[in-house]
Amino acid sequence: MEDCVAIQQLINRYSVSSSRGDVDDIVSTYADNGVWKIPSMETAFEGHAAIRDGLTAFTSQQEYLVQQNAPGVIAVDGDSATATSTVCERGKVSGSEDAFEALGFYVDKIVRTPDGWRFQERSFELVTMRSVALTGH
């Protein structure tokens, strides 16, 4: 159970860091040769430098982003694990009055490293994405 708690904390850290726009902290949740995938965009970033570049490109187009994740379903097998968590992202496009909402799942392969649990592969499986007109405050 201790490993499951540590892995859920890793998932939570990723989500909070995403909401705060802390690219360096997001990158630190990945193993050195980790991979971040977005199959619906036919996109994959491998290694810390590529993940940092990909995140920077995405976040430069956003005024803000809030990512919420539901507790994950986690299975641990020694020094590796898998997890699936439901994700809802809401944000605002820079220079626009439009916002967006993305709903999907993160499907993760996770490994134990000397620094603790890290994502070996994190794949965002998009269910739907829509534009939302902002009104009021």
Image (cartoon, helix red, strand yellow):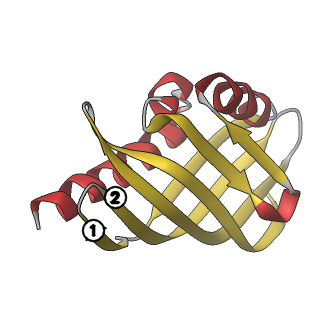
Q: Tell me whether circle 1 and circle 2 mark residues in contact (CB < 8 Å).
A: yes
Kindly tell me whether residue 136 is visible in this rendering.
no
Name the residue tied to disc 2. Answer: 80
The location of residue 49, given as percent across then percent down, is 65, 22
Name the residue nearer the viewer: 131 or 89. 89
In the image, 72 versus 88, the foreground residue is 72
Q: Residue at x 18, y 58 (%)?
A: 3
What secondary structure is marked by label 2? strand
Q: Could you say whether the residue bearing mark 1 is in a helix, strand or loop?
A: strand
Amino acid type at mark 1: Asp
Instruction: Report the residue at 37% width, 50% height from top.
Output: 111
Residue located 66% across and 71% down the image: 103
Where is the N terminus found, in terms of image quarters? Answer: bottom left
Q: Which residue is mark 1?
A: 77
4 relative to 50, above or below = below
Q: Residues within 10 Å of mark 2 (few under 14, many from 20)?
A: some
Residue 1 relative to residue 88: left or right? left
